[in-house]
Amino acid sequence: MTAESSPLTIAQLAELAGVSTATVSKVVNGRSEVSSQTRAAVEELIRRHGYRRQRRRSTPTALVELVFHALEGDYPAEITKGVARVAREHDLTVGIADLHRDRAAADTWLEGVLRRRPSGVIAVFSGLTETQHEHLARREIPLVLLDPADVPARGIPSVGAGNWNGGLAATRHLLELGHRRIAIITGPDSALPSRARLDGYRTALDLAGVPVAPELIDRGDFLIEGGQAAAHRLLSLPDRPTAIFATNDGQAVGVYHAARRLGLRVPDDLSVVGFDDMPSVRWTIPPLTTVRQPLTEMAAAATSMLLTLAQGEPLPQSRVELATELVVRDSTAPPP
């Protein structure tokens, strides 16, 4: 049927759904005051027929929306610096949203962003849902993912870091110091950066001919408290590790706390490597050896990509990956 191959207007969708044009408009614009049954019916029609927005396109607001799944630690500050740097050059304002790891908060944020119609959205770490992607695409609001936790959906541009190489470099450094009982505290299993860093760790051990000991792999949550709990478990093993690779700096700080509580000294009794190189870790005692993830540069790259899309121009590549670098300080030494 030819109607199915031609996108429909709001009026045509309303007629097919048996509802008012105002109701369809609310669904299209992500408003919440529509019943779930009606919303599902209208969205199904849009999936089948498509939706043709009438060309009364408003001018985008000179605003970049930066959305975090949670505003915790130094990480958001480093990201915001990079976005703000590029935004200033283009006379744009930066708006920051914190979704509090909460689906309801994400829905409320989406309603607001569709009303504001910014120049674009940068979603940090966790991606948005497929439905949220669709709403932004219908309103022609560009989206770029920064340090995504999952493999981005097809067609969604993203910026990340060399997580596998970073995990490899951190573990190789400990191996070169003479460590063989090297533990790792990962992030959540669902997080793509965590899995890549773990793969780099495993590869380094394999290349050195050191068997991977399952008891030396402990899962964390990228938080200080989670790193402390995981380190306490690892350091309570009968044959405890002589080194711990914490897959972010927050967890590495947690390792410091666990070691101190158990009467262990860093690096005399235990070497520690982190990941991120947040500004604060050069002031820990001892200063932390870590893998630098160029968060500010990653954020600047994501913002430049977003502005290219906002101007209607194609991107030369949809995935940008910046290199990580090992920064050696005083938290690592040969094993006792």
Image: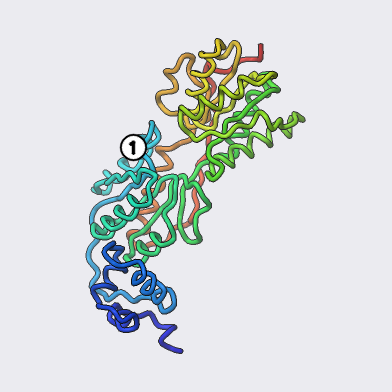
* Residue 267 found in image quarter: top right
Three-letter code, disc 1: Lys
The residue at 40%/35% (across/down) is 75
* Residue 167 found in image quarter: top right
The residue at 57%/12% (across/down) is 264
Mark 1 packing: few (<14 Cα in 10 Å), some, or many (20+)?
A: some
Q: How many marks?
A: 1
Q: Vertical placement of 25 versus 64: above or below? A: below
The residue at 37%/50% (across/down) is 122
Q: Quadrant of the C terminus?
A: top right
Where is residue 43 shown, x and y percent of the image?
38, 71
On screen, residue 37 versus residue 294, left or right, reads: left
Label 1, secondary structure: give it. helix
Where is residue 259 shown, x and y percent of the image?
54, 16
Task: From the viewer's side, name the closer residue of 109 and 57.
Answer: 109
Task: From the viewer's side, name the closer residue of 173 and 193.
Answer: 193
Q: Vertical placement of 121 versus 37: above or below? A: above
On screen, residue 114 versus residue 273, left or right, reads: left
Q: Vertical placement of 284 versus 52: above or below? A: above
Colour option used? rainbow
Where is residue 125 shown, x and y percent of the image?
44, 45
Q: Vertical placement of 294 versus 256: above or below? A: below
Of all residues, the one furthest to the right in this rendering is: 209
Where is residue 78 shown, x and y percent of the image?
37, 35
Which residue is labeled 1 in the image? 81
